[in-house]
Image (cartoon, helix red, strand yellow):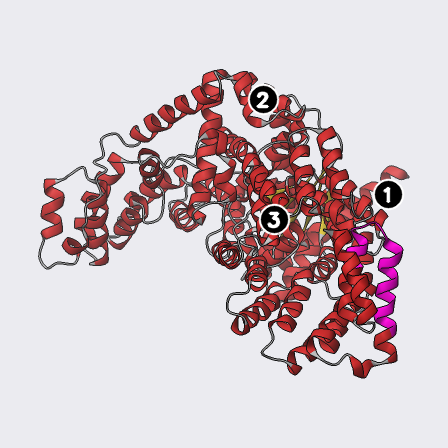
């Protein structure tokens, strides 16, 4: 009731003419009654009163008001925090309001950790304060979904009509693509305040996502009905569209917000991110600079500009279709492999999905996971992602960022480039589950050891009825029970895509993508090109259950309680396994027990039986790794090699096993096998010198000089243990290729490290003599 609120304030000011608190409330009432001039007048009166009589406004409540007014004027956030809010907190440490003001300010600057501390302190002084719980929910949102949800529940328990908390529920429904649920929550807000601008803004977002431009415009108009130049409305709409990968539309809304208020920092920050994700880098960085100039305290913008300094050190590789930015050292080692992989993906996937891809795709690969997180999400310390595609911009973690267990970077880039194709085809209008499902499916089409396959735990989840209905599958990504359930969502999504292609054909999948690009909702598009959504869900459920039941069909999948047997004296577990020779859990427990007890010869039998029953099991603690270890301990190197070769052929990320296999193949002098194994290892971690050393040795023996030269050059970048030998070998290969200047440089480098290296001296003399002869021949031909 904005008009009534304004009238009340005006009446109050006749009696309390020096009140700054009434004026701040009055300013908001004036904005929402369309009188921006009066709103500005009240704000300036606050400044004048505080300047004339600062002694009058020394209690905590007034200091909080003065600080909030100063922020509206554009004062430095740090000065406001120290000069007003912290001062108020010290004056009245038992009052929650200063703590809340500090928390809101920290939250607005993306300083979640600082905000968390302030809101927790507020709750100590007001144990059931909805605003404090709400602030905690927002502060936890990026770091702990469980804590955030618990705090939000507490806020609504304290006040079931707490509009900010209800609006968060609206946002979560939209994120989960539960549009009907979003409408219900909006209705709950509008029942409290029919003019609530954020509620109408969210309704505009829903209209956009439903491809209803008239409804979108009408809802935006309703959001701006009372305050026609409110920049927060367009900022909110644009932010949510960007979170749904509609970056161009999101950027347009941020520009509209800035047209209302050129100094509105949240819109500038979001616009800089949108432009960078659209590949409009010059504009993006200029906007980030402008945002930082307006607000030097904003953590997100500060991190982004710090990242720009790191990106300036990167090496740029470019061809006809791609711009790749990498750490300079990494670019020298495997940059060309990255370009080759991307070109192969482009040729295959664009042809398959009939896409004419315009413009170049930017790919940025980060050795520091925090840099990746800042570029991708705006904040560091966001884990769990190997790569992200925004459309024509891909960001990825490099193998250097993934510690001891890196994923296959070739599979990651193939997956992300597939997103480029599907996002372009749909104009970024596709649900997450379908986007991820197609990318995982295409990984498996390119290489059966990439992507995700059925596992015992997935099998159990499917048969226990934990599949998410196809029509609600995006919720499995956006509101998962656990991180593992997110991985299961990837698997289920790929399985749905596989079923669609098998049952209705690739053309049906492409028609679904075209429908999405035209603006149809996913469930409508699915219904048009299948036997209907309900039938699809029933048929897919049967398909998935059948696939689960076909996993290692001879295995007994019962999961008995074996801990007591495994830790008992005697051979109780062995006797149980004899009675249940096909039980996967029992065999695994027994084999693990034998390995832990170093009974290597006895362990071979149950491990071999496991491999025969379920040869595709390559997860943690698999029989391949344990059996290879048993053979190694028994010095049965030929058997160990056979097991490792079988394992590596089934697992594209088995780094430790691949390195051991490389050692065995080299010892056997099987250079062709060494060459093949190094190729797979370079797709996991190309930054290990030993892989390049073995590849170079194999290439020399197989008379593949180009491969050997490339491997030795990469080895020099990575820092070999014996650089003199590497330079010498490289110089010899270059001499054979008649590249005398390069050969001379490397042999001199060898002699610099090892001045008495006789073979290098001989090679240098040979190069010099040959160069002189070549010069004589050139001079004679000219004469």
Instruction: Give me the C-alpha separation between circle 3 and circle 2.
Output: 32 Å
Q: Position of residue 682 (x, y in %)?
A: 53, 45
Q: Dot 1 lies on which element?
A: helix
Tag 3 and tag 2, C-beta contact below 8 Å: no
Which part of the image, by quadrant, shows the C terminus? top right
Where does label 2 land, which residue? Answer: 512
Disc with the residue nearer the chain's start (3 vs 2): 3
Q: Position of residue 431 (x, y in %)?
A: 57, 33
419 falls in the magenta region: no
Residue 221 shown left or right of residue 349 in the figure? right
Tag 3 and tag 1, C-beta contact below 8 Å: no
Quarter of the figure with residue 758: bottom right
Where does label 1 land, which residue? Answer: 779
Q: In this picture, is 23 found above or below 89?
A: above
Q: What range of the chain is rendered magenta?
A: 27-48
Instruction: Give me the C-alpha separation between circle 3 and circle 1.
Output: 84 Å
Quarter of the figure with residue 65: bottom right
| Label 1 crowd (10 A; few <14 / some 14-19 / many >=20) | few
Secondary structure mainly formed by the magenta segment = helix
Disc with the residue nearer the chain's start (2 vs 1): 2
Disc with the residue nearer the chain's start (3 vs 1): 3
Q: Dot 2 lies on which element?
A: helix
Q: Position of residue 294 (x, y in %)?
A: 82, 61
Q: Is residue 730 visible?
A: no
28 falls in the magenta region: yes
Residue 88 shown left or right of residue 528 in the figure? right
Where does label 3 land, which residue? Answer: 167
Q: Dot 3 lies on which element?
A: helix
262 or 326, which is in the foreground?
262
Quarter of the figure with residue 131: bottom right
Look at discs 3 and 1 and give the one toward the viewer.
Answer: 3
């Amino acid at each position: 009731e904005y008009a009534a609120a304004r009238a009340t304030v005006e009446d109050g000011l006749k009696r309390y003419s020096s009140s700054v608190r009434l004026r701040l409330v009055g300013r908001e009432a004036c904005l929402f009654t369309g009188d921006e001039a009066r709103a500005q007048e009240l704000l300036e009166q606050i400044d004048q009163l505080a300047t004339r009589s600062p002694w009058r406004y020394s209690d905590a409540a007034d200091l909080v008001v003065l600080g909030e007014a100063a922020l509206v004027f554009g004062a430095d956030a740090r000065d406001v925090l120290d000069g007003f809010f912290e001062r108020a907190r010290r004056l009245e440490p038992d009052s929650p309001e200063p703590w809340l003001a500090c928390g809101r300010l920290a939250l607005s600057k993306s300083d979640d950790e600082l905000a968390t501390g302030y809101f927790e302190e507020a709750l100590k002084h007001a144990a059931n304060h909805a605003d404090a719980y709400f602030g905690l929910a927002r502060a936890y949102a990026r770091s702990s979904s469980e804590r955030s949800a618990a705090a939000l529940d507490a806020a609504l328990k304290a006040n079931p009509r707490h509009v900010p908390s209800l609006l968060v529920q609206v946002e979560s429904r939209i994120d989960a693509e539960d549009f009907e649920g979003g409408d219900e929550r909006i209705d709950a807000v509008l029942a409290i305040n029919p003019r609530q601008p954020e509620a109408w803004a969210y309704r505009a977002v829903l209209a956009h996502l439903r491809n209803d431009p008239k409804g979108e415009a009408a809802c935006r108009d309703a959001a701006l009905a009372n305050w026609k130049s409110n920049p927060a409305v367009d900022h909110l709409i644009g932010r949510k569209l960007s979170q749904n990968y509609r970056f161009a539309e999101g950027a347009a809304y941020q520009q509209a917000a800035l047209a209302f208020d050129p100094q509105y920092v949240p819109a500038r920050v979001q616009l800089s991110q949108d432009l960078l994700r659209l590949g409009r880098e010059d504009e993006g960085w200029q906007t980030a600079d402008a945002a930082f100039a307006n607000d030097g305290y904003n953590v997100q913008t500060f991190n982004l500009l710090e990242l720009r300094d790191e990106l300036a050190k990167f090496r740029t590789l470019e061809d006809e279709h791609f711009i790749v930015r990498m750490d300079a050292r990494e670019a020298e080692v495997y940059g060309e492999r990255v370009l080759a992989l991307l070109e192969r993906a482009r040729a295959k996937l664009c042809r398959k999905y009939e896409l004419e891809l315009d413009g170049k795709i930017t790919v940025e690969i980060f050795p520091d996971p925090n840099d990746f997180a800042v570029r991708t999400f705006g904040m560091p310390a966001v884990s769990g992602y190997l790569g992200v595609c925004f459309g024509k911009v891909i960001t990825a973690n490099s193998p250097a960022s993934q510690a001891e267990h890196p994923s296959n970077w070739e599979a990651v880039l193939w997956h992300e480039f597939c997103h480029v194709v599907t996002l372009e085809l749909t104009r970024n209008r596709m649900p997450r589950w379908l986007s991820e499902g197609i990318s995982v499916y295409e990984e498996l089409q390119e290489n059966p050891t990439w992507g995700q396959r059925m596992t015992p735990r997935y099998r159990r989840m499917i048969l226990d009825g934990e599949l998410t209905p196809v029509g609600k599958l995006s919720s499995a990504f956006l509101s998962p029970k656990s991180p593992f359930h997110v991985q299961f969502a990837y698997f289920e999504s790929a399985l749905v895509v596989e079923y669609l292609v098998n049952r209705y054909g690739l053309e049906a999948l492409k028609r679904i993508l075209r429908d999405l690009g035209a603006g149809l909702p996913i469930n409508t598009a699915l219904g048009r090109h299948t036997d209907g959504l309900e039938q699809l869900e029933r048929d897919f459920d049967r398909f998935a259950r059948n696939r689960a039941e076909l996993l290692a069909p001879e295995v007994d999948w019962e999961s008995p309680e074996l801990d007591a047997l495994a830790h008992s004296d005697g051979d109780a577990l062995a006797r149980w396994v004899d009675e249940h020779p096909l039980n996967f859990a029992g065999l695994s427990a027994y084999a693990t027990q034998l390995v832990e007890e170093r009974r290597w010869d006895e362990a071979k039998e149950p491990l071999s039986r496991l491999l025969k029953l379920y040869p595709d099991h390559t997860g943690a603690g698999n029989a391949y790794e344990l059996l290879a270890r048993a053979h190694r301990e028994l010095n049965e190197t030929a058997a160990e090699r056979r097991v490792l070769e079988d394992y590596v052929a089934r697992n594209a990320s088995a780094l430790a096993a691949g390195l051991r296999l490389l050692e065995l193949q080299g010892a056997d002098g099987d250079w062709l096998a060494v060459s093949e194994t190094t190729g797979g290892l370079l797709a996991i971690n190309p930054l290990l010198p030993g892989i390049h050393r073995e590849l170079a040795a194999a290439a020399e023996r197989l008379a593949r000089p180009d491969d050997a030269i490339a491997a030795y050059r990469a080895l020099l970048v990575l820092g070999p243990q014996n650089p003199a030998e590497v330079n010498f070998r490289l110089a010899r290969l270059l001499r054979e290729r008649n590249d005398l200047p390069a050969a001379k440089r490397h042999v001199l480098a060898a002699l610099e490290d090892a001045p008495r290296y006789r073979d290098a001296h001989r090679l240098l003399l040979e190069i010099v003599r040959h160069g002189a002869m070549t010069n004589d021949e050139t001079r004679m031909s000219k004469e």
